[in-house]
Image (cartoon, helix red, strand yellow):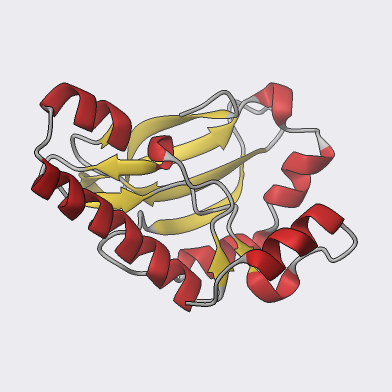
Amino acid sequence: MGGGGIVIECFRKEVPTRKYALKSPRLSVLNTDATQKALNREENERAAKLSHENVVLLISSANISVDAGSPIWAQLMEWVDGAEDLATFIYKNGETPSHLISLFCGALSGLEYIHSQGLIHWDIKTANCLVSKHGVVKIADIGNARDEMGLDKKNEKDEIAYRECPSN
């Protein structure tokens, strides 16, 4: 994960054999206006309803207490076994052109699904495309996806980007 937070492998008491990813922002970024806006519960709930083989499943998001300290915002997500980001995977494996096309088609399939559900990812990059040990590309970091109808029209940059986005 980038400079904004950490991801740890965890499990739930109810199903101790199943792995999950617990993602939380670093404490240094928790109090910024941008972070608070990005952690909008309604948007996280929408993202948690996404279900597609090329999208990391966001199971839930909430404030959690750790060692009697202040609550920390966290997201519980599907664990992508053996995952590497797309750029690292390609660099390590020296993929053939036909396999590269297959990998990118998986990423595009996930993005197409996210858009079909009325959400915009806003941070698509190779670091947010994970390749599982089975070679499946999954779009990650969708908890901050924004509803295409809920864009902040006061922000001219967002408005221009929205108008220039192709609809299909």
Vertical comparison of 102 with 89: above or below: below
Is residue 42 visible in this depiction of the protein? Answer: no
Looking at the image, how many numbered discs can be counted on the residues? 0
Q: Which quarter of the figure has residue 112?
A: bottom left
Residue shown at 21% from the left, 47% from the top? 18
Residue shown at 65% from the left, 65% from the top? 164
Q: Considering depth in this image, is 65 or 1 the residue closer to the camera?
A: 1
Is residue 152 visible in this depiction of the protein? Answer: yes
Where residue 24 appears, as percent x and y from the top left, is 55, 35
Is residue 47 left or right of 138 when viewed as pictured? right
Where residue 158 appears, as percent x and y from the top left, is 76, 57
Residue occupying the far right of the picture? 154
Where residue 36 appears, as percent x and y from the top left, is 76, 45
Is residue 24 left or right of 78 when viewed as pictured? right
Vertical comparison of 98 with 41: above or below: above
Residue shown at 43% from the left, 32% from the top? 7
Is residue 49 left or right of 96 when viewed as pictured? right
Where residue 86 appears, as percent x and y from the top left, is 29, 37
Residue shown at 35% from the left, 54% from the top? 56
